[in-house]
Amino acid sequence: MSTATSKKANNQLSDGRSMRAMEGSVTQMQMFNPFPRGRFNPAVEGVAKVKDVDDALNISRIYAAVMGSRWVRTDEYGVYHRDPNAPLGRELLWVERGVLYRKIIPDVPVQFNGREISLQKVVGVGIYPSISLLKGEQTDENEFTVSPVSLDAIAGKVRAMNFMRNGWAEPDEHGFPDGDKPNSVSSDTARYGWVRTDFDNKATGYHGSLARGVDDCVDDWRDVFAGVGWSSASGVALVGHDANVAKGDTIAMLQHRGAPMSETSDIRVAPLVRSVPIVGEKTDNGHHVRSAGHDCEQEGAAAPGVEVIKSEGELIVRGTPEQLEAAARLLEQLKK
């Protein structure tokens, strides 16, 4: 089988994992269980983390090609008291447009400031690493309650930190601006932590998905938002679980039609969006301008909606999991 040196696709993060935009938009409540509506397969890909989106914005710079101008909610979920000197307590209330969003704070141990304490006693920000650990339910006409799916599910996973409140700081290992590492805008690695300062009189704090890309090119895409409105519609970036699948700019590699089909490698499935190049340049104010345009030579379709690209003796197939499954069936027929 012939080999080829492939360049990194324009929907791949710096570690080779693929990123794509989930179809449609979501409010905060819709974030709690998006995949049953057929928008993605959690066995193959998941909602992007803060650090994933930071990579797309500032390192691999694929964000504009994948998400366009949309901002995104990430997989992590944060909770903090409106009073920066008060503990989280047993529950927090966020109020928006007359609707009350209640967050039940479980009594689970977390590491905070060098010691183990209950999450309820944290004077800082509680972080759930995935919104899949939480459930959102309507409990009254104008009330919703967010609580853990189960205490066993969150055991050892919830963390707490001194999230930088409306200031610059170096990020922790998860990409969150760390209040224990303050810095300034002049540091390229610093990130700006944004939290709410405007609260309804009945609100005791805020809870919701962390967001990125909210302001168009503000601070070179370095803001981490902990306070976007629940009713605001956002995009969602999805990232493949397996970096090895995405590396080499391939999902399914089919031997070029001139080669024996018996030598064709197995099809590997992981959804990718179409490959598009990014043109990046700096403006006078230092912000990055990114535009996208296709540079792929299409070879026809292996199945409806599937993109097939010729690449030095190989065919590279891109599409949704369903489209790739259809392509795999076609390949099996060709082999016969």
Image (cartoon, rainbow, N blue to C red):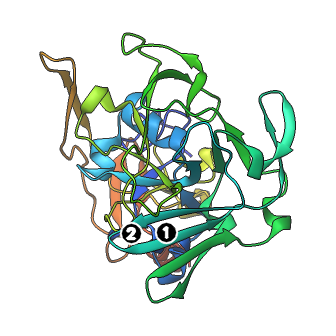
Where residue 64 sits: x, y (%)?
A: 27, 43
- In the picture provided, is 154 more to the left or to the right than 238? right
The structure residue drawn at horizontal position 31% and vertical position 65%, both measured from the top left corner, is 233
- Pointer 1 with pointer 2, Cβ within 8 A: yes
Give the alpha-carbon distance from disc 1 to disc 2, as whole Å.
7 Å
Residue 162: quarter of image: top right
Amino acid at pointer 1: Met
- In the picture provided, is 163 more to the left or to the right than 309? right
Which residue is outermost to the bottom? 141
Q: Is residue 70 above or below residue 288?
A: below
The structure residue drawn at horizontal position 60% and vertical position 57%, both measured from the top left corner, is 265
Residue 108: quarter of image: bottom right
Q: Quadrant of the C terminus?
A: bottom right
Numbered tag placed on residue 27 in the rendering: 2
Residue named by callout 1: 31
* Residue closest to the eye, 57 or 252: 57
Where residue 27 sits: x, y (%)?
A: 38, 69
Q: Is residue 324 above or below residue 127?
A: below
* Residue closest to the eye, 273 or 103: 103
- In the picture provided, is 179 more to the left or to the right than 217? right
Where residue 20 sits: x, y (%)?
A: 41, 55
Where residue 263 sits: x, y (%)?
A: 60, 56
- In the picture provided, is 49 more to the left or to the right than 286? right
